[in-house]
Image (cartoon, grey):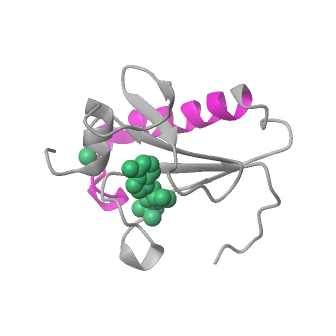
Amino acid sequence: MSDCLFCKIIAGDIPAEKIYEDDHVFAFRDINPMAPLHALIIPKQHIATINDLEEDHAGLMGNLFLAAKQIATDEGYAEEGYRTVMNCGEAAGQTVFHVHLHLLAGRPLQWPPG
Ligand code: AMP
Ligand code: ZN
């Protein structure tokens, strides 16, 4: 989508610090990190929110988690643990309407989240 921030990052039109890419998934460091590791893992296909998922996106969503595991392992956080979060809609704090899995690690993470 031409007016989507994350589609522009995938296209290279807006700079980002890439940390992972494969055929279907792209990941980069969050510009406003909430933890020593804060990555955003996104499908290359534009999907606005979880509410827009269709049955044939199931594998793609699994690929986001496989990328999270890979990044956490590469960055040395797989053993101590990490958190993945996907916000859906404004009430949950979603501000960019291209689905993204937050990967957070490197500090104690409280539960429940705010
Ligand atoms: P959410 O609030 O779940 O929609 O998350 C959106 C995330 O995108 C926030 O954590 C922002 O800090 C992050 N973000 C916004 N613009 C950029 C950008 N240009 N590069 C990297 N991360 C960004
Ligand atoms: Zn997009």
Q: Residue at x 50, y 49 (%)?
A: 101
Q: Quadrant of residue 95?
A: bottom left
Q: Residue furthest left?
A: 2
Against 1, residue 12 (above or below) is: above
Q: Check the picture and name the quadrant holding the C terminus.
A: bottom right
Locate residue 44 relative to residue 75 in the image: left or right. left
Against 66, residue 40 (above or below) is: below
Q: Nearer the viewer, residue 71 or 36?
A: 36
| Coordinates of residue 56 in the picture (x, y in percent) | 30, 37
Regarding residue 73, the answer to whether it shows in the image is yes
Q: Residue at x 78, y 35 (%)?
A: 78
Q: Is residue 62 in the magenta section?
A: yes
Q: Residue furthest top?
A: 23
Q: Which residues are magenta?
A: 47-73
Q: Check the picture and name the quadrant holding the N terminus.
A: top left
Q: Nearer the viewer, residue 11 or 86?
A: 11
| Coordinates of residue 31 in the picture (x, y in percent) | 50, 51
| Coordinates of residue 55 in the picture (x, y in percent) | 31, 44
Q: Residue at x 22, y 50 (%)?
A: 4
Q: Residue furthest front?
A: 15
Q: Residue at x 42, y 38 (%)?
A: 16
| Coordinates of residue 68 in the picture (x, y in percent) | 60, 37
Classified by dominant secondary structure, the portion drawn in magenta counts as helix
Regarding residue 100, the answer to whether it shows in the image is no
Against 108, residue 27 (above or below) is: above
